[in-house]
């Protein structure tokens, strides 16, 4: 694993969005994010001015800030063509855009400083059907999951202000053996191996991930993703 320099990387953009009517009747989303100029306050529930349409599955203290590597955009353009959505950061609903950090060199539990704030990596992103509609690609959410180019979430340990151009720097790495791509493979590859699941369950997982892995371990079955990935009922 090639970790980012201890001096960190520069943030290309900090982005926020507001919830608006989305692609399906009765649905709203704030997935379309736009860059912010100047100082932006980062509080326990994320960037000031950012919204989530469905707080049952988005936002909250464990999904306060979403980080998506701009490094991945070139690969998506190679696969999807020059989509206007991929012209600038914000295509994936991210709040932080950088180059030099990705799921191979960011670990669960990492603590990072950004401006006056301290952020802790809480979980990888499990993509949902809204990406399908945003990109006009019916299986986009599944592609994001299968490629491992998912992005990740932070909880905010210390509130503070930050700006585009600020450095995001590694402060502490308690689980160096657990880069996010290792953990995300457990989900995407539908792993049922008891040893691998038990090892992951020793980590400080968010409640929903702990419940998911415990259910796999107890049942010997993998969950149905249709509702999350395709936007239709499981079964």
Image (tube, rainbow, N blue to C red):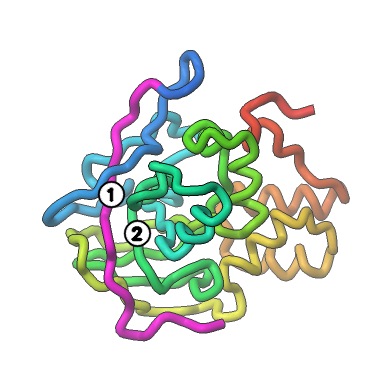
Q: Is residue 105 above or below residue 137?
A: below
Which region of the structure is painted magenta?
A: 1-21
Is there any visible trace of residue 213 in the rendered image?
yes
Q: Position of residue 134 (x, y in %)?
A: 47, 35
Q: Is residue 216 above or below residue 169?
A: above
Determine the image quadrant of residue 97.
Answer: bottom left
Q: Residue at x 43, y 24 (%)?
A: 22
Q: In the drawing, what numbered circle is on residue 15?
A: 1
Horizontal side of residue 201 vs 180, given as left or right:
right
Q: Residue at x 73, y 70 (%)?
A: 199
Q: Quadrant of the C terminus?
A: top right
The residue that mark 2 highlights is 97
Q: Is residue 2 magenta?
A: yes
Q: Residue at x 14, y 52 (%)?
A: 37
| Mark 2–mark 1 CB contact (< 8 Å) | yes
Residue closest to the eye, 6 or 10 = 10
Residue closest to the eye, 135 or 179 = 135
């Amino acid at each position: 694993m090639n970790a980012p320099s201890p001096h960190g990387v520069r943030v290309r953009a900090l982005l926020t969005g507001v919830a608006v009517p989305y692609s399906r009747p009765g649905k709203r989303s704030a997935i379309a994010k736009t860059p912010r100029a100047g100082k932006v306050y980062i509080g326990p529930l994320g960037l000031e001015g950012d919204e989530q349409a469905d707080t049952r599955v988005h936002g909250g203290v464990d999904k306060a800030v979403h980080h998506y590597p701009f490094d991945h955009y070139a690969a998506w353009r190679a696969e999807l063509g020059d989509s206007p959505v991929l012209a600038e950061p914000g295509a994936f609903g991210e709040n932080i855009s950088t180059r030099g950090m990705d799921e191979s060199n960011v670990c669960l539990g990492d603590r990072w400083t950004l401006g006056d704030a301290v952020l802790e990596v809480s979980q990888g992103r499990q993509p949902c059907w809204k990406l399908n509609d945003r990109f006009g690609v019916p299986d986009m959410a599944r592609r994001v999951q299968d490629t491992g180019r998912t992005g990740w979430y932070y909880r905010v340990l210390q509130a503070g202000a930050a700006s585009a151009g600020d450095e995001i720097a590694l402060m502490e790495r308690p689980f160096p053996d657990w880069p996010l791509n290792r953990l995300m493979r457990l989900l995407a590859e539908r792993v049922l191996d008891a040893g691998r699941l038990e090892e992951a369950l020793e980590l400080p997982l968010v409640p929903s991930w702990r419940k998911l892995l415990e259910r796999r371990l107890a049942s010997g079955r993998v969950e149905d993703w249709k509702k999350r990935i395709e936007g239709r009922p499981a079964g």
